[in-house]
Each structure stands twice: as C-alpha cells, then as structure tokens.
Amino acid sequence: MFTPIFLLASSERQKKWINPLDCTQQSLPCYHFDRRINEIVGSEDSLKINVFTKTINPLKPLPVMVYIYGGGFTEGTSGTELYGPDFLMQKDVILVNFNYRTGALGFLCCQSPEDGVPGNAGLKDQNMALKWVKDNIASFGGDPEAITLFGHSAGACSVQYHLISQASEGLFKRAIIMSGSTYCSWGLSPQRNWVEKLAKAVGWNGSGKEMDALKYLRIVKPEDIINNQEKLMGPEDIRDGIFTPFGPTIEPYATEGSMIPQDPMVMSREAWGNKIDVMVGGTSEEGLLMMQKIKLHPEVLSNPHLFVGNVPPNLGLTAEQRIGFAAKLKELYYPDSEPSMENFGGYVNMMTDCAFWHGLHRTILARTNSGSSARTFVYRFCVDSEHFNHYRIMMIDPTYRGTAHADEMSYLFSNFTKSVPAEDSFEYRALQTMVDIFTSFAIKGDPNCEYTKELQWEPVKETKPTFKCINITNDGIAFVDFPDFKRIELWDSMFINDSLV
C-alpha cells in the first residue's frame, strides 16, 4: 500500500502501522469518470493493493499473477465488480491487482524540474506496487521469484513499459500483453502545453508560466479536472492521431524513478524485458470498440478523409505517399463498396489492425529481432457468444457479432453479472481454456496445458511470411498462421523509415 502526494506528484511508500488494518471492504478507485455508470467516482485515498489467495500457508510458495487494468489511461478500477478472482482461484496461484492514477491526475507532465512533475505518475504508482509485491508477497504465501505481470489494453501498454524501463527491472519473471502495446498509436502522448490548457479550462486566468498553472491546478477539485481533461484537444491534435492529452509520455528530465526517459522504441532495443518469456494476444474484432463513437457520429464513415486520416501521421511520409496508402486501405477494407452503418465490418477490421494488432505485431517483431533466446507465445481470442461477451453486449451493442476489445476479460475474471456459463457450453470450455493457459504460463512459464494437449503451441520462431498463434474459437483451439496477417502487412509497409532494431 502506498500514498500519493496528491496532486500529480509521485507516490510514496505507506508508513508501517501497528494496529490491525481493516481489509474487509474494497477501497474506492482513483478518481475517474466511470463510463459504465456515467459518473465520476473515486477518492484521494485510493492507491491500494488487493491480494487474493486460497491460503496464506501453502505447502510451497505459490506463483503470483499481478494484473494491471486498462481504460485508455483515463479511467479504470481494480475492483471485483470487473476483475473478480473466482475463475483464476481454481488454480494454485495468487492474484494481485491495484489502483493507479489515470488522466491528468496520473499523467500530467511539466517541463521544468522546479515543478517536480515529470509525468508518468500513474506508471510510477504501478512500479511502487510491483516493488511492494516483490517485498511482501511471501507473507501471503506467494513466491517473489515467480511473479507474472499481465495487463489488458492500457494495462498491457503499461506492462510493456515495465518490460523496457530499467526502473522495473527484475520486479517480475514473466509477462502477458493483452490487446495493447507501446507500439500502438495511442501508447505515447506528446506534450502540447497541456498544463496551461487544462488550467485555463478549469478557470485559471493567468498566462505564460507553467508553474503558476500547476499551482492553480493543485487547488482545483479533482472532479473539475476530470470533467475538462478530455476537452483540450483541437482539430490539429485529432488530425495528428493523439488519443489523449494525458497518457505515458517521454519525461522531459531525468529523475531517480524515471519510467520513460527516451523514445520507447529506442528503449526497447536493449530492454531487460527482451530476456524474459512473454505471451502476447488480442481479440479478433478489437475494432468493435470504436463503434461506441461511430453510433453517435455515423458521419465519420462517410468522411472523404476516413482512410488518409488513419495513415499514421508521424512516419515522415510525403503527402503523395499518404494518399497512396489511403487508396490501398480503401482497396483492402472496402474493395467493392463504401463505408456505412450498413457495412461497418470493414471499418471494424481497419480499427482492429491499426489501433491494436499492428502494434502487437511490432512488439512480436521487436522481441524476435532482439537476438534474445526468450520466448514469445501468441494467442488470438475469437469466441463469439450472445450471452458471455459482456463488454460488447453492455458497452457496444448486443446485436453486433464478433469478439470485441475486452470481451476476453469475462473468460478470465468474474464480474458484477455473477454469471457462469453452463458446463456443457462452448463459453465454459473457452473460460476454462483461458484460465488454464494463463495460469499454466504463470506457474511453469509455458502456456501449454490440458486444453492444448492435442497440439503443440510453440513460441514464435519466424515472422516471415507470417507468424503462428493459438486461435481460440467457439469450436475449440488450433495452432495456425495468424489469420489476418495479409492485412497487417499493409500497415507494416507504412513504417518504411521506422526501424525496430
């Protein structure tokens, strides 16, 4: 457990206490806007760690699985309403998760060392939690030398930052990256005077000095910051592909706990995490996530700049090259029709590739090209259930088909629905498959398990002409060439001036 110097600075280790600590109730999350209930929730006293175990006195120390939640670096909670331990507790592992600050409260960055806010406080919250686990998990029956760090979406991007940051070296033994990567277009937020823009948005009338703007922000209610933090981006920011003003960023000056001191791609080349085994994966229709906004703004699909707008803006491409790639995107995703709400499948595929799988593919390439002997296992989850793909059903549209971003969470964690699929259903088999794969990787460093015994899931050995993965479907699992590789190749071709090694 640890304490934030609230607002915006790095957290500090909690001082030891003498009296018993009441842990019978869940802590409140860090301040954020919860889209599930459409209101701001949270507390300043929220940087808490949860430990789930069947026994604190096992016959031998148990492997530990530490989970980092997603939420676009703007929201999220470690609470059991979304991340209950029930399914994973079938196995002999300990599950740990924790809260960390998001949005401006966790990722605002000031350029001057005098301000003491170099950014990435949310990642540093995570780093401190990992140090606590390493130092204390033995008291709960856990093995501090058998920690697997895993995370989803922004949580997966966070996992990869810990894999490449020297600040987190040695704090875990293995990692699982789920539907997110530092190579994803949303994985790094550039600095564009966000401190002053946010201060003005919440009522500051000054100008010029970042320190003065920061002083004003420190006395503003967290609710006012949260209500305004996503309103700061102008048309040029959106054009340049900025996902959020407040996410992981390259820190402007070095500190003892720096998480991202330089370009993450440069950090990745010599990263300590290249030497440990990693599992990487995602869902087959990640891009269904984007339909939340498209349903509100269907005109996006008919925008004549739809395709050129999705060519990454920061690759040094000429205008002619960008137009050429836009034409190729149109031919790939809509060869015989135009995008519309009646045939949004092509758009979903494009978002699946550009926002998620291409970044995951670059992670796979960077690891296989690093020269290390560490293994990289890849999975693709495409279980399409009318009843158990909870994220798609509740947050996107229950009538849509496909396996959306975050749908696999229902097959690893129990949640507020309290639902468990019937034992003779494909959903139950998929749930047991996912739990067995993830815990097998945590326990023995190999995801091969009871549910993969009829095939041999091998780590990535070649990336050309494609790479192989486990494909998990309604009908079972298979070890196959990655099904959508031809689509990923086009995105790879755009990065002609961007070397991974």
Image: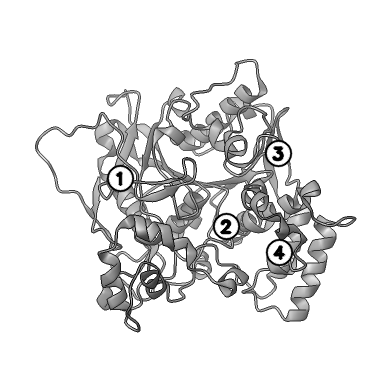
Q: Is residue 56 visible?
A: yes
Nearer the observer: mark 3 or 2; the answer is 3
Which residue position is annotated with label 1? Answer: 134
- CA gap between label 3 and label 1 equals 39 Å
Left or right of 454 in this view: 246? left
Nearer the observer: mark 1 or 4; the answer is 4
Q: Earlier in the sequence, mark 3 or mark 2?
A: 2
- CA gap between label 1 and label 2 equals 25 Å
- CA gap between label 4 and label 2 equals 16 Å
Q: Earlier in the sequence, mark 3 or mark 4?
A: 3
Q: Mark 4: few, some, or many residues within 10 Å (few <14, many ≥20)?
A: some
**Callout 1: helix, strand or loop?**
helix
Q: Quadrant of the N terminus?
A: top left
Q: Earlier in the sequence, mark 1 or mark 2?
A: 1
Q: Is residue 106 visible?
A: no
In depth, the one of 472 and 386 nearer the eye is: 386
Q: Mark 3: few, some, or many residues within 10 Å (few <14, many ≥20)?
A: many
Q: Look at the numbered discs 3 and 2 and tell me whether their residues touch, using CB distance below 8 Å.
A: no
**Callout 2: helix, strand or loop?**
helix
Which residue position is annotated with label 3? Answer: 402
Extreme-right residue of the structure: 336
Q: Residue at x 54, y 72 (%)?
A: 234
- CA gap between label 3 and label 2 equals 29 Å
Q: Residue at x 60, y 16 (%)?
A: 423
Extreme-left residue of the structure: 18
Q: Look at the numbered discs 1 and 4 and tell me whether their residues touch, using CB distance below 8 Å.
A: no
Which residue position is annotated with label 4? Answer: 492
Which residue position is annotated with label 2? Answer: 367
Extreme-bottom residue of the structure: 208
Three-letter amino acid code at the position of disc 2: Arg
Residue 283 percent across, percent down from the top left: 64, 43
Three-letter amino acid code at the position of disc 3: Gly
